[in-house]
């Protein structure tokens, strides 16, 4: 069943001779429980696509529909509520509040939405425990490793029980072991918790953890395929990326 549908998205930055068309008519559908990796050369429109799907930016043309909500027609307040309650975001820089503990960081989206501190922290603790951080709930970000900080960021993105998780280079600041751990975690969120996950990445090894791979080049989708776990998927992804670059 389709969860989010983007139709003929166009996005251009600047004007005149300096104009850069980041997206040039992109259409994409994500179904419930999908885990999709988006790859492509630098400047191909990967992050722009993620921002439009998440309502962080508006397209110049085209539509984005999340369930029954058409994001492109919502006002700023409506978009804010959709982002806060139905979409989770994870970024390369963890964006944790340095003076807040792990549990306070994870609870923050709920407290900002008017949930009492006790209820918010109770839900935050559940997600931290699910992600293997039950013994780190009171640690500050600088007392955690990079991989642990990203897990806190993922727990924060999930504490509102969003239907869609958008991850922009979520392993970009991590060592290879921590990156692999985060990739497996995102896959398990899709497999076990039926979250729909779209991940932008430049790393073929990380992309290989997804079930579906979308290649962008020059603002358009040039390939969209399902991945098979029975193949040497990482090598296959790397070869295809080189061919399309």
Image (tube, rainbow, N blue to C red):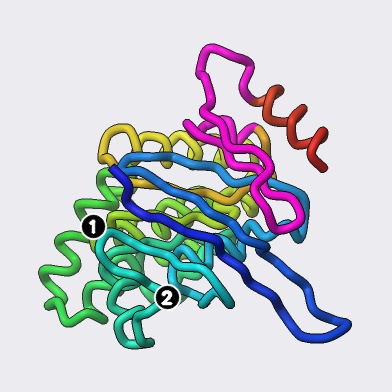
Q: Within the magenta stretch, is there residue 78?
A: no
Could you tell whether 109 is left or right of 119 in the image? right
**Residue 48 horizontal/vertical position (percent):** 61, 65
In the image, residue 167 lies at what x, y percent?
Answer: 50, 55
Residue labelled with disc 1: 161
Report the side of 146 relative to 175 (left or right): left
Viewer-proximal residue, 10 or 55? 10
Residue 189: quarter of image: top left
- From the image, which quarter does the N terminus lie in? top left
Dot 2 or dot 1, earlier in sequence: 2
Q: Quadrant of the C terminus?
A: top right
10 Å neighbourhood of mark 1: few (<14), some, or many (≥20)? Answer: some
For the residues labelled 2 and 1, the Cα–Cα distance comes to 23 Å
202 relative to 20, above or below: above
Residue pointed to by mark 2: 72
Which residue does the image show at 81% across and 35% down from the upper left?
Answer: 242
Marks 2 and 1 close (CB-CB < 8 Å): no
Disc marking residue 212: none
Instruction: Pick whichever, 215 or 210, lies toward us.
Output: 215
The residue sitting at 58% across, 37% down in the picture is: 224
């Amino acid at each position: 069943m389709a969860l989010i549908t983007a139709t003929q998205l166009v996005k251009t930055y600047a004007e005149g001779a300096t104009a850069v068309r980041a997206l040039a008519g992109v259409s994409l559908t994500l179904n419930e429980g999908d885990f999709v990796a988006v790859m492509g050369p630098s400047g191909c429109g990967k992050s722009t696509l993620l921002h439009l799907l998440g309502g962080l930016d508006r397209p110049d043309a085209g539509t984005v529909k999340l369930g029954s909500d058409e994001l492109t027609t919502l006002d700023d307040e409506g978009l804010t509520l959709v982002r806060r309650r139905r979409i989770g975001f994870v970024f390369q820089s963890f964006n944790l509040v340095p003076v807040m503990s792990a549990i306070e960081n994870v609870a923050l989206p709920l407290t900002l939405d008017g949930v009492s501190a006790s209820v918010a922290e109770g839900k935050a603790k559940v997600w931290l425990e699910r992600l293997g951080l039950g013994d780190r709930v009171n640690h500050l970000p600088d007392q955690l490793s990079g991989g642990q900080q990203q897990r806190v960021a993922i727990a924060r993105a999930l504490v509102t029980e969003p239907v869609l998780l958008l991850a922009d280079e979520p392993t970009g600041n991590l060592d290879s072991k921590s990156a692999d751990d985060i990739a497996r975690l995102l896959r398990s969120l899709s497999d076990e918790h039926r979250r729909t996950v779209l991940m932008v990445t430049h790393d073929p090894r990380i992309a290989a953890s997804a079930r579906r791979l979308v290649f962008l080049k020059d603002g358009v989708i040039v390939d969209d395929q399902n991945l098979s776990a029975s193949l040497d998927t990482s090598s296959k992804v790397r070869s295809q990326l080189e061919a399309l670059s």
